[in-house]
Amino acid sequence: MSTKLLLKPLALAVLVATGAAHAAVDQYSDEASFLAAIGASATDTFDDLAPGVGYTGPLVRTAGDVSYTVSTAPNSPILYGAGDANDAWLSSNNRKDFIIFEGFSQPVYAIGAYAFGSDVNGLFKDAGVTAARITTADGETVSFVVGADVDNYFGFVSTSAITMFEIRTFSLSNNGTWPTVDDLTVAAVPEPGTYAMLLAGLAAVGFVARRRNV
């Protein structure tokens, strides 16, 4: 992002479960806290995209050694280059579509990005609400919703591999607001300290469950 104002950090531990399967997920609302939690990472800036140009998805992209696919659904397969020549962004061609990141070439345990709304010309629009959600290898979904701001940041760190990351923008405006993403960051392996912290949370939940069954 050309402008990166730090928001108040949000590190919310979330436990999701299906039967005996559990994933612990930390959520972050600013880039600095997210990067500090994951250590080594790689970022796809999307600066190779041309603003105002449509791209038929899915696209194969890379962030460091991690390749992935990005697509839009359910209304149009066309992705859209937004922003300007100084800082290109990735958007959708249909304002009601999700932008979907998946098909990671290696297990990804942390993912984050700036996500916000843009107008019909691909320029930032201060309207609507931008939401992000991830799906883990356990088949669980964790959602995170914030207001419209060019500095909205969504970061997730999970003990289970993240298989999908989705962005959607909701707006009541007749002119519409398109979901837009910049600086997608991934980490294949979480930092040992972060992983240990998340596992400790799971152990505590397991202990409580055992006490309740006694």
Image (cartoon, grey):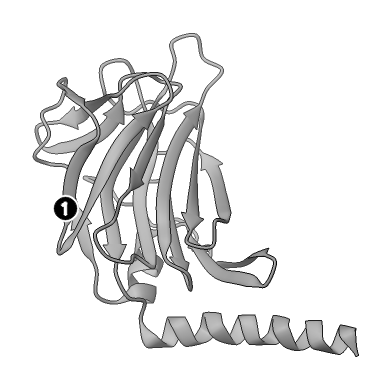
Up the image or down, 189 lies above or below 32; here it is: below
Q: Mark 1 highlights which residue?
A: 62
For this view, does 193 lie left or right of residue 48? Answer: right
Q: Residue furthest front?
A: 19
Residue 196 on image: x %, y %: 48, 87
Nearer the observer, 91 or 86: 91
Question: What element does badge 1 sit on?
Answer: strand
The relative height of residue 158 versus residue 102 in the rendered view (above or below) is below
**Hey, which quadrant is residue 54 in on the image?**
top left
Left or right: where does residue 139 sit relative to residue 116?
right
Q: Is residue 34 visible?
A: yes
**Going by the image, does 204 lie left or right of 173?**
right
Give above or below for 82 relative to 155.
above
Residue type, mark 1 in image: Thr
Q: Position of residue 38 (x, y in %)?
A: 35, 74
Q: Position of residue 203 (x, y in %)?
A: 64, 87
Residue 134 place in picture, x, y as percent: 48, 52
From the viewer's perspective, is 7 left or right of 17?
left
Q: Residue at x 27, y 65 (%)?
A: 106
Is residue 2 or residue 59 the one in the foreground? Answer: 59
Which residue, as the protein is rendered here, is positioned at the far right?
214
Which quadrant of the structure image shows residue 120?
Answer: top left
Q: What quarter of the picture does the C terminus occupy?
A: bottom right
Q: Is residue 76 above or below residue 194?
A: above
The answer to which image quadrant residue 24 occupies is bottom right
Which residue occupies 34% across, 65% down?
A: 108
- Category of crowding for the residue at label 1, using alpha-carbon neighbours closer than 10 angstroms: few (below 14), some (14–19), many (at least 20): some
Residue under the image location 69 percent in, 86 percent down: 204
